[in-house]
Each structure stands twice: as C-alpha cells, then as structure tokens.
Image (tube, helix red, strand yellow):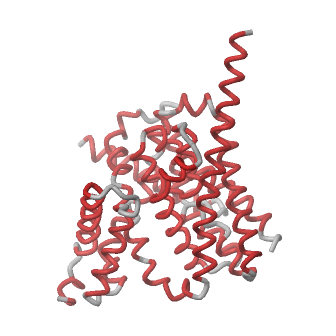
Amino acid sequence: MKDLLGNALFFGVVVSLLTYELGLWIKRKWKLAVFNPLLIAILAVMAVLLVFHIDYDTYNEGAKYLSYLLTPATICLAVPLYEQVELLKKNVTAILVGILSGAVASVTCVLLLSMAFGLNHEEYVTLLPKSITTAIGMGVSEELGGIVTITVAVIVITGVLGNIIAEHVCRIFHIKDPIAKGIAIGSASHAIGTARAMEMGEVEGAMSGLSIAVAGVVTVALSMVYVYFW
Amino acid sequence: MKYVRQFLIILLFSFVGEVLKYLIPLPIPASIYGLLLLFLALQLHIIKLESVRETAKFLVEIMPVMFIPAGVGLLTSWEALQEMLVPVAVITVVSTVVVMAAAGKATEGMLHLGRKRRKEGTER
C-alpha cells in the first residue's frame, strides 16, 4: 500500500481534492464554522499520511502542482480588482487607511504580546510578519534573522484561522460594508482568508485581494522599524 | 485555443513577476509584481479583460485547494513549533482578531466619513 501510494504521482492531488470535497459536503450538512472545508481537507490529508505512513515529501511530489498554481492564481486577483476599480477609486482613502491600520495593529499586537510572553528577539521577528502572504513574510523573517519554518507555519495557521472566523469577526464587530469586510479579511489573513472573501462576494474578494499586496508591502516597511523595538 | 491563450498570458505575467523579483532586491514575491502589472495592463487597456477572464476566474475559484499542501506541511514544522506553542497560539488568535477588527472598523469609519462629506458637498 505504502509503495503503491508512494509511487503514484497523482495521489497527492487526488487526496487533496477528495478531502476538500469531503469538507464541502460536511459543511453543507452541518453549517458550523469549525467545519471549514480547507481545515477539514488539511486535517484529513494529515490523517491519511499518518495512517499509511506516507511522508510529506512523497505526498508533495504530486501535491506540489497545486502549490505551483498559487502564483498565477494570486496574479489573477487583478481581474476582480479591475472589475471593481470604480469602487476602489471612489474610496481609495478609506481603503488605504483601513489597510494601514490593520498592518500597524498587526505588528503592534505581536510586539506587545512578545513582550508579555518574554519571547527573545529571534522569536519576536519570526512572528512579526505573521499576517502577510507567505512569500513576503518568509523574506521579512529571513531578512530580520527569524526562524523561517516557524514563520511559514504561523502564516498558514493565521490564514486558515482567518478563513474560519472571518464571518464571525465581521458580525461581532458590526463590520457590514462589503469593502470593509474585504479589507479586514485580506489584511488579517492574506490569500487564505481571501479565498473565503471571494465566496462572500465579488467586492469582498476584490478588496481582500488588494489588501494582500498593500498590507504585504506596508508590513515590510513597518518591520524594518519594529525590529528595533524588542 | 481561447483557454490556452488566456493561460499563456497569465503565466507570462507570472514569469515577468519572477524576473522582477530577481532584479529588485526586496522581499516581494513574483505574485505581487504580477498582480500589480496585470492590473495596470488591464487598466491601460494593454490587455483586454476578455483575454484573461475565464481562466482567471477559474484559477481564483479553485484557489482554496492550493493551500492544502502548505497546510499539510505543518506536519514537518511541528517539532520546531512545539517549543513555543503557547505564545504562538495566543499571539496568532489574538492578533488575527485584532487586525481584522482594526482594519474593518477603520475602513468602515472612513467610508462613512467620506459619504457624509460627499452628501454635505452636494447639499451645499
């Protein structure tokens, strides 16, 4: 069994898509936030790998083609953004202030909590870029001397968490405007959150996509300053 | 042939993004350069929306599944993560909620302010 699955090139993609379908089915059946299709898929694939003693590299031999599409797909977020360009132009100040507030809140929150937990400098800079997209966050962490593997893990966890709680946070804090929802989700949970914003609506998705880019770049600049604070 | 050409254009922007990433010494990934360039190209009518639309919509729609391998990859970083599990868990949850609320509330506040100003402007 292990040899068979280990040598099958399409195993990684099939098991990923199959578990995602399972996640969608479970979500339809029980409409609870914890039944997030992405979370279910990740946990189910982990379970399959552990049960059949398949290591991650073997799985990723096939699954990497899914990750391969991530760059083209992120670039394609330009399309919904272009379709909403009038909305963007009309509200550009509000949008930029919103994203900037999110980025400042993110690094400040990490700073204060790192102080509270007594983390060392290395651990602090590892967490500093946690809210931004993986590729930018990795670069920041490396540049500042953080532990890149942990940065990537925390970024992914943040994204999945944002994907799960987005709707609830918006409801609890009475964030009702689709533009504000999109900015909130994209600023807090980058592309993984944006995947959820896309399902909420075209405006939410477009604004969340924009936030990935802007929040990413702003956080690079902020990190260069915040690195000296702890 | 339509889809091949659309996919080609999207991959072309991915490639140009990679070239820019190589040339510019900033921690900004190819996808961000590509996103901004494609947006500009659409805006300046260098690329027509019809030349990328269907494939772009398809890729954006299937985007969630592209994060499954990265998520499963947490299996391999588990050991490193375990050492600082509690602070990481608290910081992740708290900051995600705080950032979402801050960004959302700030945007909404500014939107209301803008609408009020515009309304007052038209009344005057």
Viewer-closest of A94 and B85: B85
Residue drawn where x is 51% and y is 88% of the image: B79
> Looking at the figure, which quarter contains the C terminus of chain A?
bottom right
Q: Is residue A137 left or right of residue A105?
A: left
Q: Quadrant of residue A122?
A: bottom right
Q: Position of residue A51 (x, y in %)?
A: 27, 87
Q: Position of residue A225 (x, y in %)?
A: 80, 64
Q: Position of residue A123 (x, y in %)?
A: 68, 80
Residue drawn where x is 25% and y is 87% of the image: A52
Name above or below for residue A224 compared with residue A85. Answer: below
| View extreme (right): residue | A228
Q: Quadrant of residue A8?
A: bottom left
Residue drawn where x is 63% and y is 38% of the image: B108
Q: Is residue A1 left or right of residue B122?
A: left
Question: In this rendering, does residue B40 appear at all?
Answer: no
Viewer-closest of A213 and B25: A213
Q: Position of residue B52 (x, y in %)?
A: 37, 40
Q: Is residue B87 left or right of residue A30?
A: right
Name above or below for residue B54 compared with residue A101. Answer: above
Viewer-closest of A1 and A119: A119
> Looking at the figure, which quarter contains the N terminus of chain A?
bottom left
Question: In this rendering, does residue A150 appear at all?
Answer: yes
Residue drawn where x is 23% and y is 69% of the image: A14
